Image (cartoon, coloured by chain):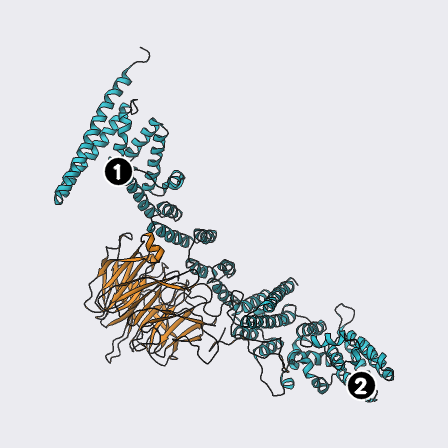
């Protein structure tokens, strides 16, 4: 049920991150060749590179889009100890005809003394804000008070995490019941049993971020972390990419009466743990409704995880990084995962040197959001729309010489557990 | 029964789709495409098969008696492997001489189509006078076979009794050896008696285990009750250990066993589309069948499946609109799913954006409205389409952004001396009040219009009001005063004395404020001085004009009429 398409990205070195914009029609890739490329999807579904420029003086680790309410804005972070914010300038008409656009640097954030490993914009209801994390264990939160002036950013918070940070994730919930929250993952390799995932929450009274939780059960290096979109739930869901895929729920406990406005503590449950990748898991990404999680690992595969209506999580799809199907099924994968290429060891498979592999749904487009995300409809799309059921067979009624009627199964997704 | 009608509608839709696909398959030239279409037809046919059975067993919940008839219809409708053979025999000149003649008769008998079977047999009888007696008896037996009636003409017990008698009669004839000389007729008699082995011998005419099931029931237990079906439904006898059940079989079996949830689960696994499962579950839910099964997740499953299906629609460039309706019918999560999905729809064109907005506004999704308008406004602003940006920010009720855009308009005016997007600004109406700057923009444009229409005194009044009521930002006062110059220099006196005093006061306020500015301009002395010079000249000109106007107006106002 999936179809894989390959794009010759022409990066001259490893691609470390791929990020879709909010509507899923633009994509940014960043690489060790120190550049960022922006791709636009045309009407007929092809991706064209509309910009490619050198962004840093070191490998670019991550790239991310701001919400379109702020315009066309990207942020990148790099080994060169800086993070940068870029804005697209609407070019001259001849540029448009050539299908090229220009991006200008609006600001460079130079506060870090070590490699900046992740950069993420905060949810839009918080204004124009972003967070970076560095190898020296500091998370910095910057804000641009005037959304029309992207050159003015001020450092609002510096959070010292004590462990080298590898990834951050903002909690997207805009509910008034939830204060701003950010999860930080660490890939610290030294042998210790320190919690590699920490949750920081904004305290209205002290006007600072303070540590609210540490996931003590995660003691292996963490490569990626992602909060799921909140569907009006009271609790949060967090996915962690470490030596396996883990999904946690965090239920806020009732605040102590003595410290109103103080930190909320959480009741933490692990609702799923999957070691199917059988190797390091590098990226995790949610779809827009937070109902499907995609993960990528050193086994060169992308796996999709879904909970049925009884909240049991199961694998509903596997895709090999080179686009071939798994389990010898004659199906191909249609799937949108710009999942991470961040496998330094997987040089050629997933997002290796020159090609970027992406998987897309047969219909229109990948939903938005960075990386995989927002692909609400993962599983087989409704057949009335497209010829999605290529391999689905069920040659039921016509021409079967056998004595029994049904000759082939209707459709099989690998490891599909269905409802 | 309304629900049965709905179910039938679904099935007719599936059939129509199948028909279209079939046509497409026939007319396709590319063999790959053709096989694809054919596959689709097969899948649709399976869907209809399953749906039909579910309709009989669950929606209509046919009771013993009518159940048999419905199942017979069902089998007849879906087993068409034999159609060609039937057609061939019936259309031949001498059917009874056709080599497949008896096969066709058997097909009719197996499907309970007694009249057709008898009709064919009569042809055989007329061709073979020797077997006339045998034929008459068989024909009679077939004619007399009791069938469940749809109306209330007989009760089940009556029917059972009659059937028992008939069965015994058939038995007697068989045991008497009446049909011994004609193996075909003998086998038919055995089938009438429900002899399993005899029926199984005609396996290839039935092709499926469920056909076998229905035939067996017809000839051994026609008054079967729905719940008893599971006792008879088994595949092993038919398959004989040669092949294993396939998804379709599992689904049908679950249906015969009245395991509704199992049916849904198996369908979800087997079918690649959520359409079938979502709609079937919804229908069953409406029949109140899922809850009655006493499983707490009954209604949640319906919603779960509908949400899945609808989410899938949103990735399509136009079918997302259907998805909206589906979400509307999901009480728990529909709204939030809609909110999340609708924001992500790419807004390639204005029409699409407006369509999306209308949907959001109808459902009071204010945050989404605001967000979408803001995104559109931002896009317009980046492309320098100020008018569009302004109308989007008005729609978003975004005062801050409206102020920003109004400032841009005013800046443009100062630089180029004319306005763009006049239509928009002229027709702002009450939305002008969204932001002070916007109000000023609107009123300022009005001033220009009045001036253009030579309604000078109104224009003058407006201009003054803009400053005195502090609608105009201080930065713009110089421009306004400069605009007043032509009015002051006009050959007719426009500003009254009082108005002139007001203007003078405004000018003084303005220049008083400018003294502080000079301190900041130390850093850039040359241009600052140039600016100063320009400013000073302007101020002097204004002062002169104001003084002259004052002089003229005093005289005018002091002059008595008619002297």
Chain containing the residue with disc 1: B
Image spot of residue A311 (x, y percent)? 45, 72
> Quick check: B562 left or right of B97?
left
- Horizontally, residue A371 falls left or right of residue A58, namely right
Residue behind mark 1? B476
Indicate the chain coloured cyan by its letter: B
Name the residue carrying label 2: B171
Which image quarter: residue A239? Answer: bottom left
Q: Quadrant of residue B232?
A: bottom right
* Mark 1 crowd level (few <14, some 14–19, many ≥20, 10 Å Cα): some
Chain A tint in image: orange
In the rendered image of this protein, does residue A171 appear above or below residue B146? above
Q: Secondary structure at mark 2?
A: helix
- Residue B510, given in percent of the width and then of the height, sits at 21, 35
Q: How many marks?
A: 2
Asked if both marks, 1 and 2, belong to the same chain, the answer given is yes
- Label 1 vs 2, first from the N-terminus: 2
């Amino acid at each position: 049920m999936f179809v894989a398409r390959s794009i010759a990205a022409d990066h001259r070195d490893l691609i470390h991150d791929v990020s879709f914009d909010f509507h899923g029609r633009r994509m940014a890739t960043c690489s060790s060749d120190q550049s960022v490329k922006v791709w636009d999807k045309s009407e007929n579904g092809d991706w064209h590179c509309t910009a490619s420029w050198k962004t840093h003086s070191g490998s670019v680790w991550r790239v991310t889009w701001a919400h379109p309410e702020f315009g066309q804005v990207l942020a990148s972070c790099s080994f060169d100890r800086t993070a940068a914010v870029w804005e697209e300038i609407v070019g001259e008409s001849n540029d448009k005809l050539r299908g090229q656009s220009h991006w200008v640097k609006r600001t460079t954030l130079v506060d870090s003394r070590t490699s900046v490993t992740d950069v993420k914009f905060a949810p839009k209801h918080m204004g124009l804000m972003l967070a970076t994390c560095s190898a020296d264990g500091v998370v910095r939160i910057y804000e641009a008070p005037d959304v029309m002036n992207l050159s003015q950013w001020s450092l609002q918070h510096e959070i010292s995490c004590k462990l080298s940070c590898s990834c951050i994730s903002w909690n997207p919930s805009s509910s008034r019941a939830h204060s701003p929250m950010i999860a930080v993952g660490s890939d610290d390799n030294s042998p210790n049993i320190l919690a590699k995932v920490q949750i920081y929450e904004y305290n209205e009274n002290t006007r600072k971020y303070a540590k609210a939780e540490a996931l003590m059960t995660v003691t292996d290096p963490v490569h990626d972390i992602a909060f799921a979109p909140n569907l009006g739930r009271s609790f949060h869901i967090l996915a962690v990419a470490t030596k396996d895929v883990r999904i946690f729920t965090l239920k806020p406990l009732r605040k102590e009466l003595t410290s109103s406005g103080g930190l909320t503590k959480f009741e933490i449950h692990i609702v799923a743990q999957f070691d199917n990748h059988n190797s390091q898991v590098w990226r995790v990404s949610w779809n827009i409704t937070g109902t499907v999680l995609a993960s990528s690992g050193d086994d060169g595969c992308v796996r999709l995880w879904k909970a049925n209506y009884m909240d049991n999580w199961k694998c509903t799809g596997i895709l090999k990084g080179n686009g071939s199907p798994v389990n010898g099924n004659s199906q191909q994968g249609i799937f949108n995962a710009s999942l991470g290429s961040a496998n330094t060891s997987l040089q050629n498979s997933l997002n290796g040197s020159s090609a970027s592999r992406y998987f897309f749904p047969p219909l229109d487009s990948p939903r938005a959001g960075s990386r995989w995300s927002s692909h609400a409809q993962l599983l087989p799309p409704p057949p009335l729309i497209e010829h999605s059921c290529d391999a689905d067979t069920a040659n039921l009624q016509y021409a079967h010489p056998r004595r029994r009627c049904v000759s082939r199964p209707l459709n099989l997704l690998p490891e599909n557990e269905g409802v | 029964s309304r629900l049965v009608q709905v179910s039938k509608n679904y099935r007719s839709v599936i059939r129509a789709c199948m028909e279209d696909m079939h046509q497409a398959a026939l007319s396709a030239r590319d063999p790959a495409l053709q096989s694809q279409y054919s596959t689709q037809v097969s899948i649709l046919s399976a869907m209809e098969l399953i749906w039909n059975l579910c309709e009989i067993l669950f929606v209509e919940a046919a009771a013993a008696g009518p159940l048999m008839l419905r199942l017979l219809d069902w089998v007849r409708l879906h087993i068409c492997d034999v159609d060609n053979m039937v057609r061939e025999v019936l259309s031949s000149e001498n059917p009874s001489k056709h080599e497949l003649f008896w096969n066709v008769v058997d097909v009719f008998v197996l499907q309970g189509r007694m009249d057709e079977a008898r009709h064919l047999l009569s042809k055989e009888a007329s061709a073979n006078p020797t077997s006339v007696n045998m034929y008459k008896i068989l024909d009679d037996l077939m004619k007399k076979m009791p069938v469940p009636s749809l109306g209330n003409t007989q009760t089940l017990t009556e029917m059972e009794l009659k059937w028992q008698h008939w069965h015994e009669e058939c038995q007697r004839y068989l045991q008497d050896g009446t049909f011994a000389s004609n193996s075909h007729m003998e086998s038919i008699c055995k089938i009438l008696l429900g002899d399993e082995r005899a029926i199984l011998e005609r396996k290839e005419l039935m092709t499926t285990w469920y056909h076998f099931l229905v035939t067996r029931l017809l000839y051994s237990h026609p008054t079967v009750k729905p719940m008893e079906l599971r006792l008879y439904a088994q595949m092993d006898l038919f398959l004989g250990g040669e092949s294993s059940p396939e998804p379709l079989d599992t689904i049908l079996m679950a249906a015969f066993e009245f395991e509704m949830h199992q049916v849904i689960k198996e369908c979800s696994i087997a079918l690649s589309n959520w359409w079938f499962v979502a709609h079937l579950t919804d229908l069953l839910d409406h029949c109140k069948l899922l809850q009655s099964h006493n499983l707490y997740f009954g209604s949640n499953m319906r919603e779960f499946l509908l949400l899945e299906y609808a989410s899938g629609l949103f990735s399509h460039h136009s079918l997302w609109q259907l998805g909206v309706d589906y979400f509307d019918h999901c009480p728990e999560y529909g709204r939030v799913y809609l909110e999340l999905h609708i924001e992500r729809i790419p807004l390639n064109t204005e029409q699409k954006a407006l369509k999306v907005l209308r949907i959001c506004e109808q459902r009071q999704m204010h945050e989404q409205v605001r967000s979408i308008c803001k995104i559109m406004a931002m896009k317009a602003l980046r492309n320098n389409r100020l008018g569009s940006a302004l109308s989007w920010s008005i729609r978003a009720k975004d005062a801050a952004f409206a102020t920003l855009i109004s400032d841009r308009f005013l800046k443009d005016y100062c630089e180029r001396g004319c306005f763009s997007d006049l239509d928009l600004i002229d027709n702002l109406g009450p939305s002008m009040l969204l932001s002070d700057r916007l109000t000023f923009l609107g009123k300022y444009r009005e001033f220009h219009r009045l001036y253009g229409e030579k309604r000078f005194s109104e224009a003058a009044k407006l201009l003054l009001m803009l400053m005195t009521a502090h609608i105009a930002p201080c930065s713009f006062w110089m421009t306004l005063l400069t605009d007043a110059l032509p009015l002051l220099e006009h050959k007719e006196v426009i500003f009254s004395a009082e108005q002139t005093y007001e203007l003078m006061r405004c000018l003084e306020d303005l220049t008083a404020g400018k003294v502080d500015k000079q301190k900041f301009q130390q850093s850039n002395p040359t241009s600052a001085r140039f600016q100063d010079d320009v400013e000073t000249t302007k101020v002097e000109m204004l002062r002169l004009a104001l003084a002259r106007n004052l002089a003229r107006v005093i005289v005018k106002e002091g002059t008595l009429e008619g002297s």
